[in-house]
Amino acid sequence: MLSRRHVVGLAAIAAPSLLISRARASDWPAKPVKIVVPFTPGGSTDITARLVGNRLQEVWGQTVVVENKPGAGGNIAADMVAHSDADGYTIFIVGPGMATNPFLYPSLSYDPVKDFEPVTLLITQPNLMCVPNSSPARSVQEFIAFCNNNRGKVTYALSGNRTTLHLSGELFKRLARVEMIHIPYRGGAPAINDLIPGRVDVIFDNMPSILSHVQAGHLRALAVTTKERVSVVPEIPTLDESGVWFGFFVPAKTPPEVIAKINADTNAALAYPSVKTRFEQLGAVPKGSTAAELAAFLKSETDKWGPVIRDDRIKVEN
């Protein structure tokens, strides 16, 4: 049996580490924090990083720098963060590529699960399934019938191979059991320009890129590709299959108390009125989550996209 002297002695041994842990969390951040964006400025990932980063800068009283490091479908940035110091000062904002790149690329210099710690889910953002106004389809069910009546002839536009637009189309084919031919374009604008006059039959595009065309009456939206309807277009039904998402990750072995602080402050930032309103205006849904919930979400995305990529034999050469 432990005596009182033993208990006091054990407490004295444990106390320093406990105090260090508490001090680390209370003192963090003591210097500028960097959010690494794996794409060029101006895109959805970059916009999300800057909206959240600006609020965190106010809360932390430290500069939050957004560093754009594009290339190799996000793999250059992922490799850099994976091999950064595990102290919380380098945060990786990433989306579907975290789940799809292991299947798309024959080899990676990092492991999306082993080399990172999840922090929090930031937002979800639907793609819009849109058809030309000349299309006979006025609902998803009618579009499926259109595909079945025109086997081998229906086309869907995408702004480059292996993007979320491409994968959304392939997942729709799988779930609806229809045939469609993908037509890649050099960007979203030329794809939309061909969709409007009906040169292609459908697109699954990011909300910020195509919403204005729907609101102007140039295109017909059949569905949003998320589980919930979107407040900016509440009349459009859901497809409940896929969408764009972003989350914060940090290098593996980052102290749990630092992860907990980033998580709590980021979730509060997502709920901050001006941040929340701006995201909603962009058609995004601020989410927030625990680290464990983000880990489970990443696994579900990996389980969903893996079979689609394998069956369609979509690959990227390193």
Image (spheres, grey):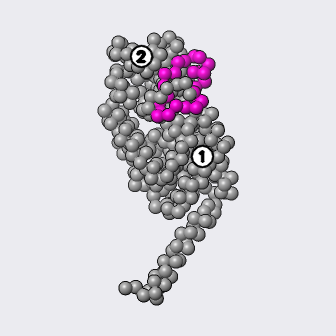
Residue to which mark 2 is pinned: 142
Residue 225 forms part of the magenta stretch: yes
Q: Is label 1 in a helix, a strand or a loop?
A: helix
Q: In this view, does 60 lie above or below 13?
A: above
Q: What stretch is highlighted in magenta?
A: 208-233
Please tell me which residue is depicted at 46% across the width and 61% down the height of the picture: 253
User: Residue 25 is drawn in which quadrant?
Assistant: bottom right
Local crowd at mark 1 within 10 Å, few (<14), some, or many (≥20)? many
User: Residue 30 is drawn in which quadrant?
Assistant: bottom right
Quadrant where the C terminus is found in the figure: top left
Local crowd at mark 2 within 10 Å, few (<14), some, or many (≥20)? some
- Callout 2 touching callout 1 (CB < 8 Å): no
Residue to which mark 1 is pinned: 270
Q: In this view, does 187 lie above or below 14?
A: above
Amino acid at circle 1: Leu
Amino acid at circle 2: Glu
> Farthest residue in the left direction?
311
Left-right relation of 212 to 308: right
